[in-house]
Image: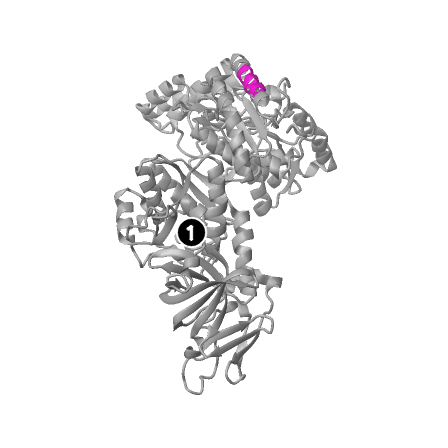
Amino acid sequence: MTRMRVLAAMSGGVDSAVAAARVAEAGHDVTGIHLALSRNPASYRSGARGCCTIEDANDARRAADVIGIPFYVWDLSEQFHAEVVEDFMDEYAAGRTPNPCLRCNEKIKFAAVLERGLALGYDAVATGHYAQVRTGVDGLVEMHRAVDHGKDQSYVLGVLDQRQLAHSLFPLGGSTKTEVRAEAAARGLLVADKPDSHDICFVADGDNAGWLREKLGERAPNHGGPIVDDATGEVLGKHEGTYGFTIGQRKGLRIGRPAADGRPRFVLDIEPVSATVRVGPRERLAVHRLRGVDPRWCGTVPGRLDGAEVTVQLRAHGAEHRAIVVAVAGPTGTEVDVELLEPASGIAPGQAVVIYDSTRVVGSATISATERVS
Amino acid sequence: MSDAVHYLDHAATTPVVDAAVEAITAELTRGGNPSSLHASGRRARRVVEESRETIAQALDCRPGEVVFTSGGTEADNLALKGGYWARRRADDRRRRVLVSAVEHHAVLDAVHWLADHEGAEVELIGVDQHGVLDLELLSASIERSPETVALVSTMWANNEVGSVQPVGGVVAAAAPHRIPVHTDAVQAVGALPVGFAASGVDALTVSAHKLGGPVGVGALVVRRDLELTAIAHGGGQERDVRSGTLDVAAIAGFAVAVELAVKQQAEHAQRMRELRDDLVRRVLDCVEDAHLHGPSLDSPDRLPGIAHLGFAGCEGDSLLMLLDARGIECSTGAACSAGVAQPSHVLLAMGCSEEQARHSLRFSLGHTSTADDVDAVVAAIGPVVERARAARRA
């Protein structure tokens, strides 16, 4: 084995702690780093679930001490705000539903951190993500889904390109969460019982709409408007801002009257300029085609994909859908045209479409438009 | 990579000297609460009082003026909060607290707390480009309305850049109005000649672990006629202004360390100056765009053991990490919150930009430092700065 100098990104949670411990145990020269992402560390989420609090930094430091590796905190709060938080707000203001974790992986963890690490003389960044990297027959580095499909996080890593993957280590990809927790306990890492983080780290209490209402301010295109029946045009209720909605959403519409047929209504469309939220029955959510922009490929540009059946994943922890993906020339440059072989529902522009060939991640794009089953 | 560790962070804490270790371990095995009236208590009391006398002699004060505390931070808090409350109780107009802009956080945060919760009006008095208090600004501030000043506090010497403050001038400005002056002399004792009575200050903070004693003990040397309100209440062991069972072993070690540090001060300072000058000159020679912060090397207004250097185009964080990996231990000299380095308030007060304040390192020498440590820094610094600059551009 070649001994590498590795930066282990440690959030303060159990996964990244075990990942760091495994890399150190394998004989690499490991340095733990915690990314301080909040411009005001006390203001992001409090409690034990997250990656941005002083408590999390202390948990990470304690884990590094137990593992016996040096540990530093890197302040990336300005970049995080500029690249991730601002983008998150812009996307919601535009009526889309962004995934800030992908954005953070693309712009912060495997970009700002990786580049700084490489310049400082490190060879790789290790994280606690559940995904597998290995060298393929063509000599390129491939990323595959984790062995534990329930924990698989290849979706949020689908933005990484060949160079980034070549410098990434995901030591947990071959393990289940249960094994990782047991290993953490066996290693004396006190974070073994810490709950998983699920929500967006910079939204303190998980109240997305509330956070957006407070932060968007002038940027919000509207602070209220009608909720309209998509079929009849009838105004069914009012909302306090289109940024509070996601396509496919059912809860929180607060429409007084039930639909004529008594069935639940779902958000079908968000129109920030006219401040209109359109709702309708579940079957109207079905999408059979979508367009993705800003594609990022993990390996070579997959001309060979064209026409072949692949699978796509359209949201974090979402299902796999069989699809035909074709790279096309579009108004934004290369775009991907995704034909779903069976319709999928609740597909929100702004989310990523991640393309898989079996368990291998081929690439990803940002969903810009969807076409409904007529 | 060498496994040797070169410790160049003595201003953070310096190793306990052997004589202090002996005194501490001897006391730890004996026990006894100095407040107890029986024989064990009397024996412990005797150790405490003899230590107090030793410290008083070394610092040119009376034994009764030494109030033992848990360290420098508590001593600063007692002087500032206790002093402010007592002065205001005597005359409610006294709300202004004048401190230099380059104080340690133990002073700055204490007075900002007084402003936020106790109606104090804090005035941060500016410093020049070398980090030395501007006496004219201080005098002007006092003279504006001397009757409203509760107290003045200026450190004896700055912990980051090593600038020595004009304590005599501060006393001269405050004394005509009978305004009490406190000085945090944590970095100065053992490095410079420090005499309490001769200085004219009313209160002086000293900490054991900066001069070869143990962590967790220090003292506020305070004139008997300066009234202080207690900040923590209990048994009233120390003149009724400081409560808590006295740590006999730590106090014994503290006294041994102070006595030794003061006795050896001149010789120690000379040795530190020579090592420091060698370090600064050789680093400036081998690194482009490096510069020294604080008063010039030959200035008398400079602590002998501190070399605070700026390296344009680097993050201090990166430098620290790269040097640490090579066994060289130093500091960015800045305060931390959640481990995130903030630009130093000291450098900002000296007129540095945020950028300049972030690219700096503090090397601080002490009693275990050798020419070998300086050689190690000189050997490492060139490649480290080059790499940190590359990382900055990445």
Q: Is residue A40 above or below residue B245?
A: below
Report the chain holding disc 1: A
- Where residue A199 appears, x then y in whole percent? 42, 59
Q: Nearer the viewer, residue A183 or A206?
A: A183
- Where residue B160 appears, x then y in whole percent? 56, 29
Q: How many marks?
A: 1
Q: Nearer the viewer, residue B20 or A140?
A: A140
**Residue A150 sits in which quadrant?**
bottom left
Q: Nearer the viewer, residue B92 or A335?
A: A335
Q: Which residues are magenta?
A: B273-282
Q: Is residue A292 above or below residue B263?
A: below
Examine the rendering and report whether any part of residue A55 can be seen: no
Question: Which SS does the magenta portion mostly show?
Answer: helix
On whether residue B261 falls in the magenta region, the answer is: no
Could you tell me which residue is drawn at 72 percent across and 38 percent down?
B145
Q: Residues within 10 Å of mark 1 (few under 14, many from 20)?
A: some
- Where residue B99 appears, x then y in whole percent? 63, 35
Could you tell me which residue is drawn at 54 percent across and 70 percent down?
A242
Q: Quadrant of the N terminus of chain A?
A: top left
Amino acid type at circle 1 is Gly
Examine the rendering and report whether any part of residue A172 can be seen: yes
Q: Residue furthest bottom?
A: A260
B329 horizontally vs B123: left or right: left
Q: Which residue is mark 1?
A: A299
- Where residue B134 appears, x then y in whole percent? 69, 30
A8 horizontally vs B285: left or right: left
Q: Is residue B360 above or below residue B197?
A: below
For label 1, the SS is loop
